[in-house]
Amino acid sequence: MDEARKAAGKGIRGKRFRSGIVPAVILTILILATGCRYTAAPADLLRKPAIAPDKQAIVQAIERTLPAYSKLTLPLREEHMEAIRLADVDGDGAKEAIVSYYNEYSTPEIMVFKYTASAWRSWVLVQQPLARQIAWLKMEDLDRDGHLELIIGWIGGFDSPNMLEIYSFQSKLLRNEAGKLTLPPTESLPYSYAETGDLNDDGSAELAVITEIGTSQELAAPEFELSLYNWQKGGLQKLIAQRVFNGVNTYERLLMGRISPRHYGMILEASTGAHGTYTAMYAWEQGKLRLVYPNEAAGLYRVSGVPTMSGDMNQDGILEMQWTREASGNPDVPYSNSIWINDWMQWDGKDGFIKIVEEFSDYRYGVQLRIPDQWVGRYMLRKIGTETFAIAAIDYWNERSGAKAELATLVAVPERKWESVQADWKQSSRSYRQLFTDSGNIFAISFVKNPPASWSDSDKQAFGEMTGVEVQFASSLKF
């Protein structure tokens, strides 16, 4: 889970690198980097992931090369969360090893190893002396010339700003005061958040950078600017710069790609308050960004009450926005007991949005339930305090007639307790369907077979249609 990854990013302390310490550190990072939920069983967490043969020798080289008291670290954000990355960064046809770590002074660094003379040897060092952490690391061929650029977002220490630096391995190497080869940045600029993506469908990646500007003691809130660059002739060329919404804490996500069947653009997400998220969508038109959401004139504006993560949720190549709302039928409940529904909305390319999927998420267990079409518009969700293993109860609900009754209960039972729970259910003649096992829990759904006898025929028929999804229910639930 994200918190585990962040914890891994802070590094794993040890007295010094010696035989057995580096493999243990890498093993721990590999476990954390795979992602987890706090419901996972200890046995799941203790399985030893295999270190690939092509990295065994690198581990030994790291052990010999890194300074005493160093520790491997993960960036806070990276496509592939690992401390050792293999990539051909200099275009010579052979892969180099890019290793991120904290040095003996707790300053983050990148060391690149080359495989020469049948052994891995340190080649070049990437440093930012004023940094205290690596926020982002990405390797991408920005201009499609066959050579990767190294993009690093450094978190500044003390009064130093966060810096985004781009390194080209085609640049001339320099030697630092200790005599080690270092790679100087080709470009360096302050930033708050950045991402790459093909915004104009030209086959090359653009770089979008959000910068906090004009901050001072006189300003009550930060102001933000969005700049868009492409990479030409070994340097950044600015395409546009424009202000974005300022009433947020900080921008935390940026996605670029197709946003409708006919448009490319981007989605921005920023934190507001303790839990809220502000979302904006921009379309790329005639070399400019046009705001298409929020659209207050069309009544399209909302701030989510929980964090959101927009994206291409149905794998159709088009980005959807994640709109959230509290589930119906839960008035006046505290925030901690709120149940949230995700409406995944896709822009129609004009003035409206189309709902692609309606979904319920429970972050305790990391489950997402795609609401079946038969349920939409006639269900309620609620938490059950009296049932130990219940994730949520689903009720049939007809707002017009007032008919409401329990339809099903979704549960997560620890594997060690499954036999006793199963025995209790059989004794009480409770029907259930076991779905699957994950993270030490057995997930099951228990449906009520019959509606109240006093209901109208139309409500009874609707109730039957909703229970009819039991067989295919497992395909509606994902992690």
Image (cartoon, rainbow, N blue to C red):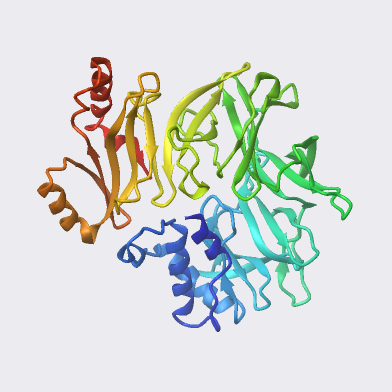
Q: Nearer the viewer, residue 155 or 422?
A: 422
Q: Is residue 460 above or below residue 272?
A: above
Figure quadrant of the C terminus: top left
Is residue 308 something that shows in the picture? yes
Q: Nearer the viewer, residue 464 or 73?
A: 464
Query: Residue 148, how many percent across, how many down?
Result: 63, 48
Residue located 63% across and 25% down the image: 300
Q: Is residue 425 above or below residue 185?
A: above
How many numbered discs sit on the rendered protein? 0
Left or right of 31 in this view: 431:
left
Left or right of 11 in this view: 437:
left
Residue located 57% across and 41% down the image: 305
Query: Residue 132, how many percent across, how many down?
Result: 69, 67
Q: Quadrant of residue 374?
A: top left
Furthest-front residue in this view: 454
Residue located 60% across and 80% down the image: 69
Q: Nearer the viewer, residue 205 or 405?
A: 405
Q: Nearer the viewer, residue 331 or 168?
A: 331
Q: Is residue 258 above or below residue 127?
A: above
Furthest-right residue in this view: 218
Q: Quadrant of residue 449?
A: top left
Is residue 370 something that shows in the picture? no
Query: Residue 294, how many percent across, how many down?
Result: 67, 28
Query: Residue 363, how many percent across, how many down?
Result: 44, 49
Residue located 78% across and 48% down the image: 212
